[in-house]
Image: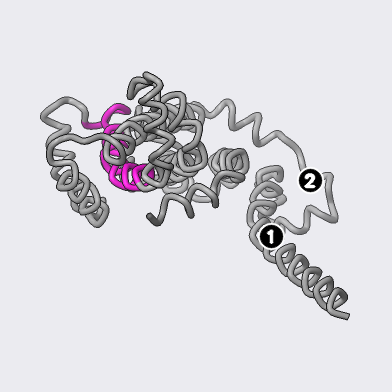
Amino acid sequence: MNAVRRGLGNALVQAFLVVIGLVWLTPLAGLFLSSLRSAQDTAKGGWWTSLAAPGQLSFANYSALLKNSGITQAFWNTVLISVPATTLVVVIAALAGYAFAWLDFPLREPLFLLVVALLVVPVQIGLLPVAKLFGQLGLFGTIPGVVLFHVAYGLPFAVFLLRNYFAEMPKEMLEAARMDGGSEWRIFTRLVLPVGRPAIASLAIFQFLWVWNDMLVALLFADSSSQPLTVELQSQIRQFGSNIDVLAPGAFLSLIVPVVVFFAFQRHFVQGVMAGSVK
């Protein structure tokens, strides 16, 4: 009887999770179907009407999207911003996290407390001062300027996350490696990084999603030649209003890349966050 109850309970939980998953995926499916419809078909009815009339669906909008120089340039700008901003944050945070966790150097604890204190600083506070600084340095309105801003504001959380994860590694394991003659760099690359892969993957997901979906920082720091996809889509809405045949495939393109990245690393996600969030 207990086995039947447990089986029924598991079945109900699984059914509930399936329903929740379908609810979350419905907007994505709706956006995809809308991106395959013409503006005329979209004006006649909602995206769900295409389920009964599959002849409405075609990839003509995506062909037109590839010919839209503004959208395609913005997409590559987004890649040029997101990939370096994510890579730099992960690399620098991994090095700093290992140093804070296992290396002895002057002012280690006060410096780490400073990093933790920076977690509470809102992004909005630094927008105008950093914009003025970038203007003096010639970085305002450029892709490197946007990347540097994202790196600067992504590092406090990244260092905090990886430091806590690395600090949980067994001390005896690192001491044994040092007794065998391993240098700090060799220990870091051959031992710490492989063990810390779940936390690093989680950090990469967080940083990439934040940068890829950002519009606030890009609106201020990027000009027309360096603006990412989020800003370009918002500009197209303002200029043309109802050009759904361009906006729908552009929005789906902007959405599907983070979804693919998340599912590619999702098996590390929960493990890395839970392990790095507490000491």
Q: Provide the secondary structure element on which disc 2 rests.
A: helix
Q: What span is in magenta?
A: 140-163
Instruction: Find residue 256 and report its image quarter.
Output: top right
Cα gap from disc 1 to disc 2, whole angstroms: 27 Å
Where is 66 relative to 127, above or below?
A: above
Q: Is residue 148 magenta?
A: yes
Which coloring applies here?
one colour
Is 228 positioned to the left or the right of 51 in the image? Answer: left
Residue at screen point 61% across, 38% down: 264
The crowding category of the residue bearing disc 1, from other C-alpha atoms within 10 Å (few below 14, some 14 to 19, many at least 20), is: few
Residue denoted by label 2: 56
Instruction: Find residue 224 and report its image quarter.
Output: top left
The mark that comes first in sequence, 1 or 2, is: 1
Q: Is 272 in front, or is 250?
A: 272
Residue at screen point 21% across, 28% down: 139
Q: Is 226 in front, or is 13?
A: 13
Q: Nearer the viewer, mark 1 or mark 2?
A: 1
Question: Where in the figure is residue 58, as x and y percent of width and height?
Answer: 76, 38
Q: Amino acid at mark 2?
A: Gln
Where is 168 relative to 68, above or below?
A: below
Provide the major secondary structure of the magenta segment: helix
Instruction: Find residue 82 and report its image quarter.
Output: top left
Residue denoted by label 1: 21
Residue 119 badge = none
Quadrant location of the C terminus?
bottom left
Q: Amino acid at mark 1?
A: Gly
Query: How many labels were placed on the picture?
Result: 2
Is 248 positioned to the left or the right of 201 in the image? Answer: right
Where is 58 relative to 13, above or below?
A: above
Q: Is residue 233 visible?
A: no
Q: Is residue 268 magenta?
A: no
